[in-house]
Amino acid sequence: MNRTADVAALSIGGLEISLVQGGRPVPVVTGVNLSVNKKEVLGLVGESGSGKSLTSLAATRLLDPRVVRTTAGSVKLFGKELLTLPEAEMRRVRGKEIGIIFQDPMTSLDPAFTIGYQLNCGLRWHTDLTRAAARNRVLELLGLVGIGDPRRRVDQYPHQLSGGTRQRVMIAMAIACEPKVLIADEPTTALDATTQAQILELIASLATTMEMATVITTHDLGVVADVCDRVAVMYAGQIVECATTDELFYRPKHPYTERLLQSLPGVRAGRLQGIPGQPPRSGRFPQGCRFAPRCPYARPGCSADDPELTRVQTDHAARCLREAELELTGVGA
């Protein structure tokens, strides 16, 4: 029996992340449990400051320990623990086994070097390709991500490319060594709606053809509706709901998810429904349910007890004390 097939490509368990303030840790992400399987696309959604990017960076050990630290939990790549891996070995994992697409390609790409040189560096570090073979691979990658005229583009600098093309270069860098897991940290930030859709479709297509497990973080539920198999919703450093995309969009089980859906254009007639108030500041989370101060369904007990993330149906979990009694509105209702 092949047990490898039963192991999640990327598994995060009990993850806790703290800011270092005044010499003491201040929790900002608590008890995050996530998993993503081969060829699956998982959307990690939440408002700015919810902990999405911190979770992604913690999974790749890219947090600056002087400012923010992973204080508890586990991150496993096909069962191999990454948090305790020596840094020299972790450098071999990044880029080769886990590909990363960062938010802003203009700050992630080095303006002093051509895109061909930057793509070549990763290939030469992680593989034994010759210089000529690496350049051919670079040209192949540029074509694979939809960049026209690769032989001309390969010698261009980042400032000579449009925002969408720069993001395609970042995708090419992330998949250059055919990683098992791809993490895309808000890959469509500052792009127009048409380019956003093209980039997301490209990532989803590559996840299928290259059989990668993929995590896409974003603040917008709408951008993952067509490309993600499952969605996990984060609020104030916690996962508050996780389900298949259709289940979450049509039958939400957490009030925060319902409010996010109601804020999407075209979901309901009339004015868009915003979420009153502001998310709590990191380290100053309210007692009990962290969404209670903004929740239209909150009762006194919600501020007393901290709910657990509880399975409510097959492949659907929610963190809400009133889940069983609430009838929340999804898309199309």
Image (cartoon, helix red, strand yellow):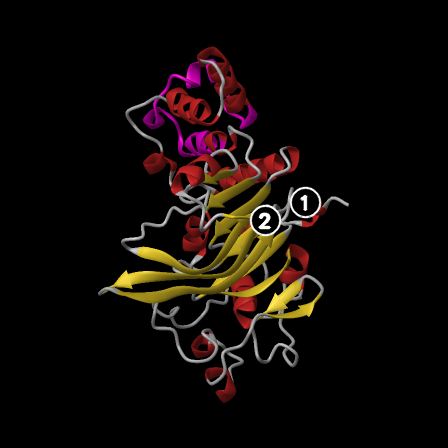
For the N terminus, the image quarter is top right
**In terms of image quadrants, where is residue 227?**
top right
- Majority SS type along the magenta span: helix
Which numbered dot is residue 279? none
Say if mark 1 contacts mark 2, CB within 8 Å: yes
In the figure, 196 relative to 249: above or below?
Answer: above
Q: Say if residue 297 shows up in the picture.
A: yes
Residue at 42% from the left image edge and 51% from the top image edge: 58
Q: Say if residue 269 shows up in the picture.
A: no
- Residue 119, how many percent across, how many down? 43, 25
- Is residue 147 shown in magenta? yes
The magenta stretch is 144-171
Q: CA distance from mark 1 to mark 2?
A: 9 Å
49 with respect to 213 (left or right): left
Instruction: Pick the residue in front: 333 or 118.
Output: 118
- Residue 160, how many percent across, how many down? 35, 24
Instruction: Pick the residue in front: 306 or 269.
Output: 306
Structural crowding at the residue carrying mark 2, measured as other residues with C-alpha within 10 Å and reported as few (<14), some (14–19) or many (≥20): few
Name the residue beneath numbered marker 2.
79
Q: Amino acid at mark 2?
A: Gly
Residue at 42% from the left image edge and 41% from the top image edge: 102
Which numbered dot is residue 4? 1
For the C terminus, the image quarter is bottom right
Q: Amino acid at mark 1?
A: Thr
Instruction: Pick the residue in front: 65 or 221.
Output: 65
**In terms of image quadrants, where is residue 254?**
bottom right
Which secondary structure lies at badge 2? loop
Q: Decide which of tag 1 and tag 2 comes sooner along the chain.
A: 1
